[in-house]
Image (tube, rainbow, N blue to C red):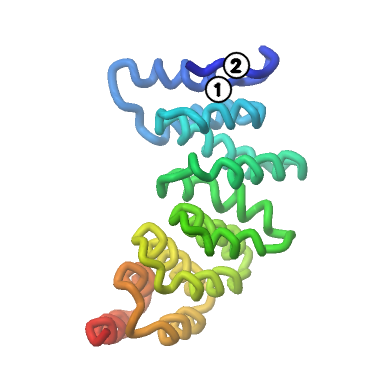
Amino acid sequence: MLEPMHDSDAPSAVDFTAALEQLTTHRAPAMREVFALAKTLIDMPVAEVGLLLASEEHLHRVGAVSIMDFRARRRRVTDEEREALYELYVDEHDLINTWDLVDRAAPHVVGGYLQDRDRGPLYELSRSSDPWRRRTSVVATWYFIRSGELDDTFALADLLAHDPEEVVQAAVGGFVREAGKRDPQRLRSYLDRHMPGLPRTILRHAIRQLPQSERQRYRNLTSLA
């Protein structure tokens, strides 16, 4: 059972679990309801968020990363809060071990924190033996892509171009595609560098926005591998 770790005025992990229990009394909640609940508890102390993240219940962990995401997005978030959220994410990454947990928080919690800092931690994550950490390294770059910064996305995608795990391949393909919307030629150069041996999952996601004739050409190259 979760036990509160803070003063009674601030939202707690117990507040989230109690409210979620009400939502799940007669049915499974829609994910948008879980997100909405998390947003009402955005001021939960980071220690309490960590307690929620440590729960064995997946929806509790969805709530935790959602609170982290909403908090990191907030305009008045302080540097100290950003750092605390980032450290919670990285230090407790073993608990962030599904694609939805990674994708919910990595862009703003990890990417947002590293926006004006050394990006070296992303490259450390990309070399991890844990596929979820490797997925984080790429997904976090969405924050950079939005502002037109594409170098890290393509550099990490180069490092992970032959990753054996599909959860990483899907992220690589999806985010080089997003970067390619800003710079189509860099996407084509990336594909040309790694064909014909690029995993099919990366290719499928990466070429989705290309003209049909180009998609077919790259698929034909894959069949030659």
Question: Which residue is nearer to you in this view: 13 or 211?
Answer: 13
Compared across the picture, whether 35 is left or right of 46 comes to left
When the figure is inspected, residue 112 is found, relative to residue 208, above or below; the finding is above
For the image, the number of numbered tags is 2
**How far apart, in angstroms, are the residues tagged by discs 1 and 2?**
7 Å
Please name the residue shown 50% across and 43% down the image: 94
Q: Which residue is mark 1?
A: 13
Please name the residue shown 41% across and 61% down the image: 168
1 and 2 marks in contact (CB < 8 Å): yes
Q: Position of residue 174 (x, y in %)?
A: 42, 64
Quadrant assignment for the C terminus: bottom left
Residue 6 occupies quadrant: top right
Question: Would you say residue 71 is visible in this rendering?
Answer: yes
Q: Secondary structure at mark 1?
A: helix
Q: Position of residue 132 (x, y in %)?
A: 46, 52
When the figure is inspected, residue 63 is found, relative to residue 1, above or below; the finding is below
Question: Would you say residue 142 is visible in this rendering?
Answer: no
Please name the residue shown 68% across and 52% down the image: 113
Q: Secondary structure at mark 2?
A: loop
Crowdedness near tag 1: few (<14), some (14–19) or many (≥20) residues, C-alpha within 10 Å: many
The kind of residue on which mark 1 rests is: Ala
Q: Which residue is mark 2?
A: 4
Residue 44 occupies quadrant: top right
Q: Position of residue 84 (x, y in %)?
A: 69, 40
